[in-house]
Image: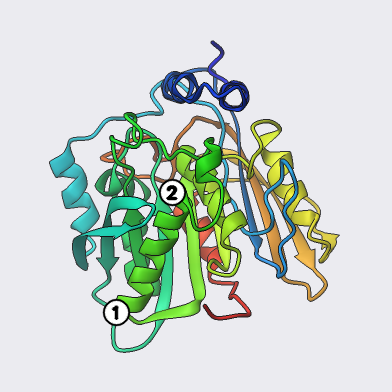
Amino acid sequence: MSPDTNITMREALRLTRAGRLTDATAVLQRGLASPGAAAPRESTASACPRPVERLQGALPGLPDVISAPGSPGAARSSSGGAAARAAAAPGGEIRHLTHTEHAGTRSYDLYIPASYAAEPVPLVVMLHGGKQNGSEFAAATRMNEFAEQHTFLVVYPEQSRAANNGRYWNWFSAADQQADAGEPAIIAGITREVMRDLLVDPTCVYVAGLSAGGAMAAVMAATYPDLYAAVGVHSGIAYRAAHDVGDNLIASRLAAGDITGQDAPITTCSAGGRSYTRTVHRNRDGIAAAESVIVHGGGHAWYGGNPVGSYTDPHGPNSSAEIIRFFLQHQSPATT
């Protein structure tokens, strides 16, 4: 089949609606892992308005970072030991924990920066892509380095092979697209467990992900809008949508009704030599409520990433820097 991510997602959704979940999973495993022609990547970001409208085929409002299909060499394997060392390199504490509740059990890694002290800090939930684990994703994104720079906690929930043999989050399953059930309940439970056990600012809780993890991040934004202040979707899709990836993410955010203006798109070159186009949508207070970043000529990989991790691209723009920049501009108006 075509390596194009949109086609892969569309076919997976068709099979899911037909009740063929095993076939849908197989399509995702083949399609998202296959190298293909390079294509523009998009990243979108948006703050979460309240109440959040739920529109069919649209993400209800939060931040996203999205990229597209794979290019040859974009996916890179890593040894578990090297990834673990890279994840720990920034110098903070890494705790390997397990969360259990009515919806199931998942392991997760928690990164506590050395700069963490006795006061509430932001929390970033990072959802890995298929065929990854928490250590690989931490290494690939360098997010722990940014946690040290800006003093926030990072949690990396891990998909189990029992739930999905390829370690894909089951974002395409109807049972995993609603609050208080399935994987959304487990991820929200992990988030709340960290908030309970450490000092977390409840107005600064964010969720981001890559590929299938990006799609699940969109699900979390839709199902728990009062828990997360913003969401980053990198190479993922909108809630219950499997086509028109970037347009749906932005359009669904704009549908919330509080966007009053749009900055003119600006195309610039990153330090790595790639051009990218940023479009900012602002709310009535002039705040950037949604951003899209289209990276031209990239692959299905995390930009600015560490080659020790899997699915990384060392060239910019730096995805982690862009996501954190956007996140730290936004706070939830309500505590949970």
Indicate the quadrant where residue 256 lies.
Answer: bottom right
| Image quadrant where one finds the N terminus | top right
Q: Residue at x 40, y 73 (%)?
A: 150
Between 220 and 140, the one lying in front of the other is: 220
Residue 74 appears at what percent x and percent y?
A: 41, 28
**Under tag 2, what secondary structure?**
helix
Q: Amino acid at mark 1?
A: Tyr
Q: Are marks 2 and 1 in contact (CB under 8 Å)?
A: no
Between the C-alphas of marks 2 and 1, the distance is: 29 Å
Residue assigned mark 1: 116
Residue 35 appears at what percent x and percent y?
A: 45, 19
How packed mark 1 is, by other alpha carbons closer than 10 Å (few <14, some 14-19, many 20 or more), is some
Q: Residue at x 31, y 60 (%)?
A: 144
Is residue 316 in view?
no
Between 215 and 313, the one lying in front of the other is: 215
Q: Residue at x 27, y 71 (%)?
A: 113
Q: Is residue 18 left or right of residue 300?
A: right
Task: Reply above or below: 261 against 122.
Answer: above
**Under tag 1, what secondary structure?**
loop
Residue 69 appears at what percent x and percent y?
A: 54, 27
Is residue 125 in view?
yes
Q: Residue at x 47, y 38 (%)?
A: 212
Q: Which mark is first along the chain, 1 or 2?
A: 1
Q: Amino acid at mark 2?
A: Glu
Q: Is residue 250 left or right of residue 201?
A: right
How packed mark 2 is, by other alpha carbons closer than 10 Å (few <14, some 14-19, many 20 or more), is many
Q: Which mark is residue 183?
A: 2
- Extreme residue in the right direction: 260
Residue 95 appears at what percent x and percent y?
A: 19, 63
Q: Which mark is residue 296?
A: none
Indicate the quadrant where residue 62 lies.
Answer: bottom right
